Image (cartoon, grey):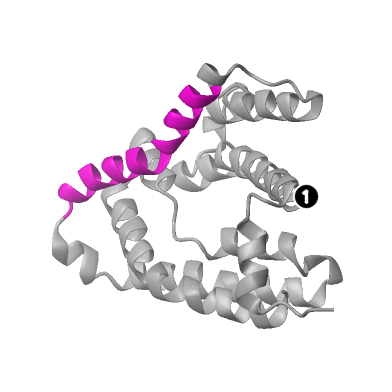
Amino acid sequence: MLTRTPLERRQSLISPASPRLSLTARAASSERASILNLLQWTYGIVIITRRKDMINIKKVFVNPVTISLVIGLFLFITGIKLPGVINSTMAGVAALNTPAAMIVLGYYLSCVRIRDLLFNPSLYLASFVRLIIIPLLTLLVLYIIPAGHGQIGMITLIAAATPVGTSTAIFAQKFGQDYERAVCMVCLSTLFSIITMPVVMYLAQMWIM
C-alpha cells in the first residue's frame, strides 16, 4: 500500500476529483456558515453595540446568508440540477465575493491614517489572539479528539486560522461604532496571516492529518 506524503494528502483535500471529500467539505462549510451567521446577528451585535435590545431575531433568520444557505441545502439534498445559464451566472456572482470584500475594505482603509494602523498596541494584541492563540487552541482540541483528525479537522482549523473578517468593519459602521479601528484590525491581521497560516497548516499536517 502506498503512503501519501503530507502534500499529497493536502491536495486530495481540495481536489474536485474526489466527490466524497467534496461533499464532506461542503457540509462542514455550510455548518460553519450557519453557526457564524447566527452568532454574528446575535452575540456579535451585542459585543459591538453593548446593547442586548439591538438583537433583531427576524434578521437572524431572514438575511441573504441564511436564505442562500437554506436554498443551497435544499438543492443539495434533493439533487435538483439548475439550468446551465443559472449555474454560470451564480458562479460568476460567487467569484465576486472576495474581490468585492477587498474593494469595500480598501475604501475603508483609504480613510485610515497609517499611524493608527501601525502604532496601536491593541491591534497587535488582537491579531496575536486571532492568528496564533485561537488556531493553536483549536489544533490542540482537534489533536485530543479522534474525530478532529483528517479532513474535518483541517477544514475547522483553516477557519480558525483566518484573519479578522471584513464583516467586522461593516458591522461596526452599520451600528455606529469605531469602524476605522475595525478596519485596521482586519488589515493588520490579514497581513500577518501571510506568515501565520502556513505555520499553522504545517503543524496541522504533523498533528491531525
Q: Is residue 155 left or right of residue 170?
A: right
The quarter holding residue 100 reads top left
Instruction: Give the percent coordinates (x, y) of residue 97.
Output: 42, 38
The quarter holding residue 176 reads top left
Q: Nearer the viewer, residue 84 or 179?
A: 84
Helix, strand or loop: magenta stretch: helix
Instruction: Give the percent coordinates (x, y) of residue 5.
Output: 67, 79
Amino acid on which the number 1 mark rests in the picture: Arg
Residue lying at 76% horizontally and 80% vertically, measured from the top left:
3
Residue lying at 43% horizontally and 43% vertically, measured from the top left:
167
- Quadrant in the picture for the N terminus: bottom right
Q: Is residue 89 magenta?
A: yes
Instruction: Give the percent coordinates (x, y) of residue 95.
Output: 43, 37
Q: Is residue 45 left or right of residue 192?
A: right
Compared with 113, 98 (above or below) is: above
> Where does label 1 land, which residue?
20
Q: Nearer the viewer, residue 135 or 198?
A: 198
Q: Which residues are magenta?
A: 87-112
Viewer can see residue 94: yes
User: SS class of the residue under badge 1?
Assistant: helix
Residue lying at 45% horizontally and 60% vertically, measured from the top left:
163
Residue lying at 77% horizontally and 70% vertically, measured from the top left:
149
